[in-house]
Amino acid sequence: MPDIHSPERSEQGGAPPISAGVSPPRSRRRRVLVHPGAWWLWSLALGTAATRTGNPLLLALLIAVSAYVVSTCRPHAPDARSYTAFLRLALAVLLIRLVFAVALGSPVPGTHTLLTLPEVPLPHWAQGIRLGGEVTAESLLFALYDGLRLAALLVCVGAANALANPARLLKSLPGALYETGVAVVVALTFAPNLIADVHRLRAARRLRGRPDSGVRGLLQVGLPVLEGALERSIALAAAMDARGYGRTAEVPAPVRRTTTVLTLGGLLGVCAGTYGLLTAEAGTYGLPLLLAGVIASLAGLRLGGRRSPRTRYRPDPWDARAWLVTASGAVPAVLLTLAAATDPAALAPAVVPLTAPTLPLWPAAAVLVALLPAFVAPTPKEPS
């Protein structure tokens, strides 16, 4: 019998021993991913940029940028496949908005009539609503711009679901928000798990030669999907109970009162500061009050975390890549907000009179900055 430390062991397929003081191979080291909070901030910033413009060219550029980053950086996990479903949902929302504009009309006046549908007479109490009638190019373009903005916002949320693992995001929350974070994470993981179950069941039905599309296939796939959701709920409840979910530590009464005062006072300060920033009369004290409220709220959350003793296994570090990802999303959000205030005609093209939209250069360059994560945080390919 050959010795386990001899060269014959390696030639026969066994793994050679790793001596003390020798680092493991690069392929066996744990790869540090980008912090999930950075991906959510990046996606929410892109969504904010989408809400500041109605230019279809900029909105299409935002969708293209998010799609490229997702295709480059999303991890190799089943829940990362939900981005395609969000793309389909965004397309469905856009089509529904156009159908409503055709069937119910639009408040936008127009002179370029495309077609005239039979109009259904409505009672007097339904004034302002019509069914059918003239369909103008101006009303269709207004509905297209409006629906494309909502579609871009849905695509940005889908990018966050595909790039950031909700379970990893839960580890980064402060202890005071742990219970709320669990509820949010369970809600966020519902759609990816549902989509993964549908793909798995449809593949199994195709292997068995059974229909996997149409109304019949949808009805026969629905019941197993619901059963899988129920099983996951029971397993999650058992896992939470086994890990002592909900237990709290004893905290002195002065600390509890201080936590309550800081948290409530900080939230009130944030609300009052935000109101001050939105109104011209209170613009002088709005920003200081907002900053004081944020600091007080963070201090209250810090003290409130003492009631939830828990540990983090392999916490995700907030490194330079996380800062770059967050900053690349904040740049288009800030610059498009400034552009909407300084040049609203470029970011919200008018449909009356009917004109073709133009692509503003520096807002488009700001959107392209969001491509930075594709170069600083790509996900390596799976080993074959």
Image (tube, rainbow, N blue to C red):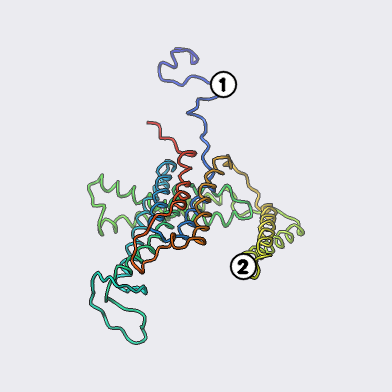
Q: At which x and y percent is residue 258? A: 74, 59
Residue type indicated by callout 1: Val
Residue type at mark 2?
Tyr
Using the image, tell me which numbered label, if any, was put on residue 275.
2
Q: Position of residue 357 (x, y in %)?
A: 37, 59
Asked whether 197 or 64 is in front, the reply is 64
Nearest the viewer among 55 and 315 is 55
**Of the two numbered discs 1 and 2 in the rendering, the one whose residue sits closer to the viewer:** 2
SS assignment at label 2 = helix
- In the picture, measured across the screen, residue 198 lies left or right of residue 311, that is left
For the view shown, which residue lies furthest in the bottom direction?
A: 124
* Front position in the image: 108 or 48: 108
Position of the C terminus, as image quadrant, is top left
Instruction: Bin the neighbour count of mark 2 within 10 Å (Cα to Cα): few under 14, some 14-19, many 20 and up.
Output: some
| Point 26% across, 55% down: residue | 217
Q: Up-down: is 29 above or below 73? A: above
Q: Residue 91, how many percent across, how many down?
A: 34, 58
Which numbered disc covers residue 22?
A: 1
Sequence order check: which comes first, mark 1 or mark 2? 1
Q: Residue at x 40, y 34 (%)?
A: 382
Q: Residue, x 49% and y 52% (percent of image)?
A: 332
Quadrant in the picture for the N terminus: top left
In the rendered image, which quarter is residue 92 located in?
Answer: bottom left
Residue 219 position (above or below residue 282): above
**Cα gap from disc 1 to disc 2, whole angstroms:** 59 Å
Q: Is residue 194 above or below residue 266?
A: above
Element at badge 1? loop
Instruction: Tell me where residue 341 appears, x and y as whole percent.
Output: 52, 62
Q: Residues within 10 Å of mark 1 (few under 14, many from 20)?
A: few
On residue 269, the disc is none
Residue 157: quarter of image: bottom left
Total numbered labels placed on residues in the image: 2
